[in-house]
Amino acid sequence: MNELFCDWIELIETTRRAGEDALVERIGAERAVASHTMFTTQQVQNAQNEAAVRAGVDAAGIDSAIVMRMVDETQELNYTPGMSYPSYYGGFYGYYGYGWGAAYSPGYMTTNTIVSVETNLYKLDGDELVWSGVTETMNPSDIAKTVNEIADAVGDNLIQRGLISGS
């Protein structure tokens, strides 16, 4: 059981690092730093290390922080009805005989997975929430692609609102 747990933690850690790196790339390495380059996973997960994290952030001169977390994963079931395709649209008498031989496409069900990620921007001086947004991704199949899409959407919105400058 511990091996599965470690593998799940590693997936989460890998995704976290990818997300941080993607945001740093969009904001600019001269203005942003990924937390995984400053702190271990244990340091940021352990609330008792708040003082150490605060000291590290202060020492690095960091004035703002972006925090992302998955807040929901929903399954959505959709039904697409079938359709018939008659072969003739002339008058009634011609259509009547052709209608029986029409092609038919049956209906079908699909399941979509929707993943919601919340992103918050904090001003650290005063510990103030400055901006918050939720992105939704449908049927994510590639973690790196999904993380990059979220980073693009968040980065574009923060630039558009004048909260960060473009790189």
Image (cartoon, rainbow, N blue to C red):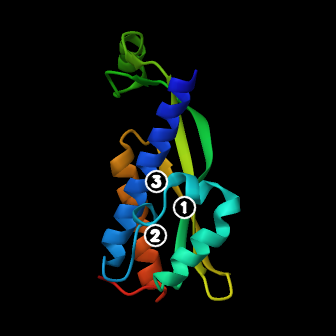
User: Horizontal placement of 65 versus 142: left or right?
Assistant: right
Instruction: Measure how far apart labels 3 and 2 are at the Cα level.
Output: 15 Å
Q: Which residue is located at x 58 percent, y 77 percent? A: 55
Which residue is at a point 52% across and 25% down the rendered structure image? 4
Task: Name the residue carrying label 3.
Answer: 16
Q: Looking at the figure, which quarter contains the N terminus?
A: top right
Mark 1 neighbour class, 10 Å CA radius: few under 14, some 14 to 19, many 20 or more: some
In the rendered structure, find residue 163 and report the number of the disc placed on it. Answer: none
Q: Element under label 3? A: helix
Mark 3 → mark 1, Cα distance in angstroms: 8 Å
Q: Nearer the viewer, mark 3 or mark 1?
A: 3
Picture quadrant of residue 49: bottom right
The secondary structure type at the circle numbered 1 is strand
- The crowd level at tag 2 (other Cα within 10 Å; few <14, some 14-19, many 20+) is many
Q: Mark 3: which amino acid? A: Arg
Q: Nearer the viewer, residue 102 or 148?
A: 148
x, y percent for residue 57 = 52, 77
State the separation of the CA atoms marked 2 and 1.
Answer: 10 Å
Tell me, yes or no, whether the two marked residues, 2 and 1, touch with CB atoms within 8 Å.
Answer: yes
**Horizontal relation, residue 126 to residue 116: left or right:** right
Percent across and percent down for residue 113 are: 53, 38
Nearer to me, 72 or 25: 25
Q: Amino acid at mark 1?
A: Met
Question: From what the image shows, is residue 167 above or below residue 89?
Answer: below
Label drawn at residue 68: 1
